[in-house]
Image (spheres, coloured by chain):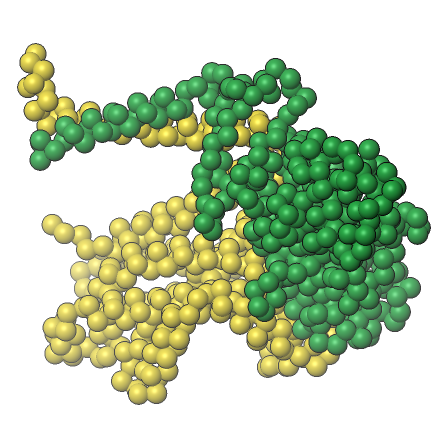
Amino acid sequence: MRKLLFPVFSLLVLASLVLAACGTPAAGTPVTVEVTRIVTAEGPATGVETPTTGGETPAATAAPVAGGERLQAVLDRGQVICGVHGTFQGFGFVESDGSWTGFDVDFCRAWAAALFNDANAVEFRGLSAQERFTALQSGEVDVLARNSTWTWARDVELGLTFGPVTFYDGQAIMARRDIVSDASAGLDALEGANVCVQSGTTTELNLADQFRAAGVNYTPVVFEDQNAAFQAYDEGRCDAITSDRSQLATQGQAVLQNYADHVILDVVMSKEPLAPAVAQGDDKWADVIHWVVYGMIQAEELGITSENVDEFLTSEDPVIRRLLGVEGELGAMLGLSNDFIYRVIKLVGNYGEVYDRNLSTFNLARGQNELWTNGGLMYAPPFR
Amino acid sequence: MNISALWRDIRFLKILAQIAFIIVLALAASYLYFNVTTNLARQGLTMGYGFMRNPASFDIGESYIPYQPSDSYGRALLVGLVNTLVVSALGIVLTTVVGVLAGVARLSSNWLINRFAAAYVGLIRNTPLLLQLMFWYFGVILQLPGVRQAIELPGPIFLTQRGIYLTWAEGTAAFPAWRVYILIAFISIFVIWFALRSARKRATLPLSPWWNLAYLLIPMLIIGIGALIQPEPPLRPFRPELTGLNFRGGLRLTPEFAALLFGLVTYTGAFIAEIVRAGIQAVARGQVEAARSLGLTTGQTLRLIVFPQALRIMIPPVTSQYLNLAKNSSLAIAIGYPDLFSIAGTTHNQTGAAIEIITIMMLSYLSISLFTSLLMNIYNKRVQLVER
């Protein structure tokens, strides 16, 4: 017994010394911090990697050239880890055969296509509304495409960088026809109503703001899961349900027993620009996310689709040639292949194709999501 | 002093082990702390509880303290904490009743009661609580008829999918005056107890048991005098009535609260039933036989011989069931009851203060648990056998 104690002690002391060696530098010199991040949690690519900044890269001297480590980490891994919604038909949904479909899901595929010339080099993570930003902050996912509203607080307080808006949405409210006669009714028709809402969303805040502003009394019934909220509404627990207009339309048609018994009010309760997001502090990675989306919008504007993209390769138009990487070094400047937009269009499609593929079945009109040339808000900066 | 002798000194080694352990603990804690702060700093985030004073600007469906969206996050979290405490406290009381009844029923010689209790315990104990909560909420309460077709039970109690409306009592104008009479009547019970005790000490012969009637008669006399002064009754029934779209009046249990309370009570009750059964069966058979041979009735045997001894065995495991109930109430988030966990989740999402919120939640549940076990430990000490 006594003989055993000594080796145990030595081990303990040794362990504490090792810990001390790891722990102290972090306190003294914050510039050369060793950051350990768990990047993946499942799959064969699992690994803990320790990207070190400051030592050999010139980042320590030139502050503006920040980051790039996330892009490198993704390239090394050979896969994009994309945080999406798992149970939202039309945006992010796991089909019964296990495949992922949806508007947001297709953007994840587009990034994978741009990086690896393989639209399936994506690992999808289904995230709840509450988990999503923490997953991004902690580095569990590379990018979040989960119908998330771009707000000041999320951009600044949560330390995120939002990408270009992929879907302009607005909060709406849906009620039963026996309570609200037609869509033109105002919020005051819902005096004293119970309203189902999902927790952890901007919707929850707008609901409070709008009803307070209109001086209408109501009782919120808050669910963690959007489907639970819809189910409770369908069972009659609530008189109305509020969410983004796109969600009410898609989920309403997918989940409610009789969609015709319900009416979505015309009242627009908020602006909800839905955009992909990445963690703040890696501009290079954010640029990749942004420009792939812009490329898809630009391609639609130029009439380039997944079917005819090959014909455009021989085009004389310098705008098209630069976009598809036939001419210029645009991709290389980002650290990608020059034809990265070509790959995206070929393998996934342009913005309009992605929209139609996922949302046309729900009769969601393009509206504000039309190209600027058609009176919408979709507008890509020039590729030059 | 000889160094090698020191290494053989078991006291010294023990102290050294403690010191080494503390060092390791402190280093691990500081490593975690610096890892968190550097990672936060790297993303330009700061830690702190300043956000607690910011307006929450979300609404909460049910609250026992005044709350509006312009109140602070701190206030919102307090609302959640109170909601958790209410459902836990009520749950603990009700689950004790259910558990004891089911536990005794398990030992009943009546075949039907016995089998029924066994089926209840077997079914409830072996399925996940989350599933049961979903069942009670979506499968039972939301399937009740709408407000206009409410099921009316005597009382009246109305069962609707918008909630369960109970007839309740409300104070009349005379209530404040009545409070004084009731207080005096209550105090008189203590006075009688003291008076009888000192009388017993002085008397050589045991007092006639008829004296115990004083406990009943004197408070009734006081209340009777009160009724003469103040003829209006203190309380009147407060019945729910259908006005417009909803019931008004009475006591309303929201569907979420009702489902959560019902789920927690039946679930924990099944565990307590088994503890009660085991506790009773653990009392030596000879004790019961001895009681019977002394001529005690079955009821007296249970009340005077079996229960006091079974209680000693039951209290520690029942305490942990109480703690489980309080902690399980956090599953409320699945069925929309705004408990602490649900509101903390929303706050986390709106402010992004993950570490702060999780710390608050951990401390809150920890304090609830520690306080519950403190009370139960005090009780446990009182019923423990005093061994000499």
Foreground residue among A348 and A178: A348
Position of residue B223 in the picture relative to residue B3 (left or right): right
Q: Residue at x 59, y 42 (%)?
A: A142
x then y, percent, for residue A202: 72, 48
Foreground residue among A13 and A348: A348
x then y, percent, for residue B180: 55, 55
Q: Residue furthest top?
A: B1
Q: Residue at x 10, y 22 (%)?
A: B7
x then y, percent, for residue B301: 22, 74
Name above or below for residue B356 compared with residue A41: above
Q: Residue furthest bottom?
A: B111
Q: Residue furthest front?
A: A314
The green chain is: A
Q: Is residue A270 visible?
A: no
Name above or below for residue A360 compared with residue A269: below
Q: Quadrant of the N terminus of chain B?
A: top left
The yellow chain is: B
Which quadrant would residue B120 be assigned to in this image? Answer: bottom left
x then y, percent, for residue B12: 14, 23
Q: Residue at x 51, y 19 (%)?
A: A55
Q: Residue at x 49, y 16 (%)?
A: A29
Foreground residue among B19 and A44: A44
Position of residue B182 in the picture relative to residue A213 (left or right): left
Which quadrant would residue B348 be assigned to in this image? Answer: top right
Q: Is residue A55 visible?
A: yes
Which quadrant would residue B113 be assigned to in this image? Answer: bottom left
